[in-house]
Image: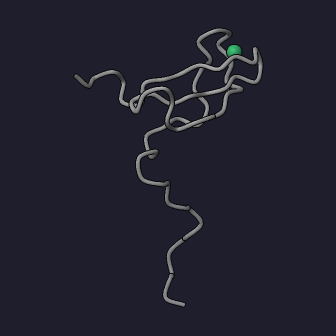
Amino acid sequence: MSRARGSSRPEPPPGSARLPQSPECPFCDSRQTELANAFGAHASVSSYWCRDCRSPFEMLKWGGGLT
Ligand SMILES: [Zn+2]
């Protein structure tokens, strides 16, 4: 028993630490979204799924700042 600090926070898997869990849906502005696939059609996008309008959408992982 060496862990004295609060250890209830699981470490996120590498590469997905910056991914929002429920971004706004670009179609209906709903927050009822969930991460469907951390690696979408491209390595720089993630696939999400909107529960409200049932539409898949993708988001850039790094804000589109890569060249
Ligand atoms: Zn939606």
Q: As drawn, is 45 to the left or to the right of 36?
A: left
- Name which residue lies at 33% across and 21% down: 64
Q: Quadrant of residue 7?
A: bottom right
- Name which residue lies at 60% across and 27% down: 48
- Name which residue lies at 77% across and 18% down: 52
Q: Quadrant of ligand 1?
A: top right
- Name which residue lies at 55% across and 90% down: 1
Percent across and percent down for residue 56 are 65, 20
Task: Say above or below: 10 vs 29.
Answer: below
Percent across and percent down for residue 60 are 42, 24
Percent across and percent down for residue 67 are 22, 22
Q: As drawn, is 60 to the left or to the right of 28?
A: left
Between 11 and 35, the one lying in front of the other is 35
In the picture as drawn, the residue positioned furthest to the top comes out as 27
Percent across and percent down for residue 13 are 48, 54
Q: Quadrant of residue 43?
A: top left
Q: As drawn, is 36 to the left or to the right of 42?
A: right
Q: Number of labelled discs?
A: 0
In the picture as drawn, the residue positioned furthest to the bottom comes out as 1
Task: Say above or below: 42 vs 15.
Answer: above
Between 40 and 19, the one lying in front of the other is 40
